[in-house]
Image (cartoon, rainbow, N blue to C red):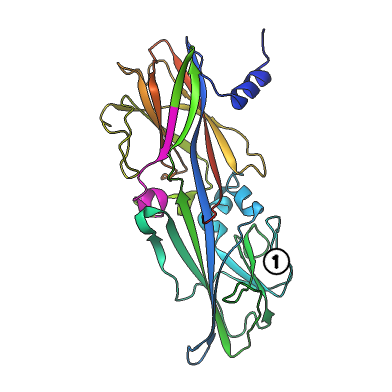
Amino acid sequence: MDLSPDEARRRLLEAPYLNLGHWLEGRVDMSAIGLRGHFDVYLKDAETGLIKRHLSFPNLITDAGLDALGQDIGVDGRIDNLISRMAVGTGSAVPAASDTSLVSEVARTSDPASIGNGLSSGPSFDYWEYEVSFQFDQGEANANLTELGVLNDDLAGVLWSRQLLQDAGGSPTTITKTSDDILQIAYALRVYPDKTVRQSNLTIDGTSTTLDRQPQQIDSAAEWGRGGSPTDRGILYQFGLWGGTDIRVYEDNTPPGDFISEGPASPNTKEDVGSSYAFAAYSAGTFQRDLDVSVGVGEGNFASGLGAATGRIYDIFGQGLPFITFFSPKIPKTDTDELTFQIRYSWGRHTIP
């Protein structure tokens, strides 16, 4: 039975497969990352610097914020810019993922405060964290404050996060700021690599092929945090820019036994491939983006088969999402085959177990 292109694509998405012959197809869920934020709020005496109140509580990342990461809105959707402004207000409505603004905004700033830890990593590189800080001076935000939010613009913009001020017990509370005070707020954003080996299956010419996907280089600030040269890069800086892709394939299909190494256990036989690629349009609320990559007839033709593949996305200087997928048995690609992958990148809120 002949299938329309749309029907063929639908079946590919519902049940990934590979066809042997001169055209090889399949989808690889290459990466899944979790995002989580936290606020520290300090009300200080402007003259003495004495801390009058300190509040510390987690945030709620909004759907609008997560959508902005996939929408191709340029630097406004880059994760570094999405957390570049802080707003405070007097609203009391319970925060919801659907929020797009504060209930009653009083003031907004991009002015930095002399607090915050910058870039750090968690135990065993369970996460990478970048902390930004903001300050409202004596003449700003003088009100009975109850809510705050993180945005990407001085006037309107995307609301990345909204939360009510909370006391040590997690109950809503109020900070009364006057012209005698300064208000400093630190916002720490964490990215969590999925450190579980995720397994799926494809059928290649009647043979079941196991796909094992895992993160790699989780100790690298340039991949998972922000850093590197000639400019900042990494997930906590450039995630949200969808400019291009790096696809690397390997002959070996033996996992390295850790999440630190780059490539398989024997990574020497490798090739950078995939000069033809296209990102699918983002669909709001999905928090995932698909990328179609073609490995041409002259690429990735290893003697014993194609054993593993990595995929990164980048804009100008590169960014992270370094995951690797191992194929067992290897894909028997030859110089008569074109291999087409649909790679899915996904992200969402991280929940502490």
Residue, x 57% and y 38% (percent of image)?
289
* Amino acid type for the residue under numbered disc 1: Leu
- Does residue 212 show up magenta in the picture? yes
Rate crowding at label 1 as few (under 14), some (14 to 19) or many (20 or more) other CA atoms within 10 Å: many
**On the image, numbered disc 1 is attached to which residue?**
102
* Figure check: 228 above or below 243: below
The kind of secondary structure element at disc 1 is loop
* Figure check: 324 above or below 135: above
Q: Nearer the viewer, residue 47 or 346?
A: 346
- Residue 19 vs residue 270: left or right? right
Percent position (x, y) of residue 347?
A: 55, 46
* Figure check: 42 above or below 29: below
Residue farthest to the front, as pictured:
353
Percent position (x, y) of residue 194?
A: 46, 45
- Residue 249 vs residue 101: left or right? left
Percent position (x, y) of residue 341?
A: 49, 25
Residue, x 49% and y 12% (percent of image)?
206
- Does residue 329 show up magenta in the picture? no
The quadrant the N terminus occupies is top right
- Residue 36 vs residue 6: left or right? left
Residue, x 67% and y 75% (percent of image)?
146
Q: Nearer the viewer, residue 42 or 335?
A: 42
The residue range painted magenta reads 211-226
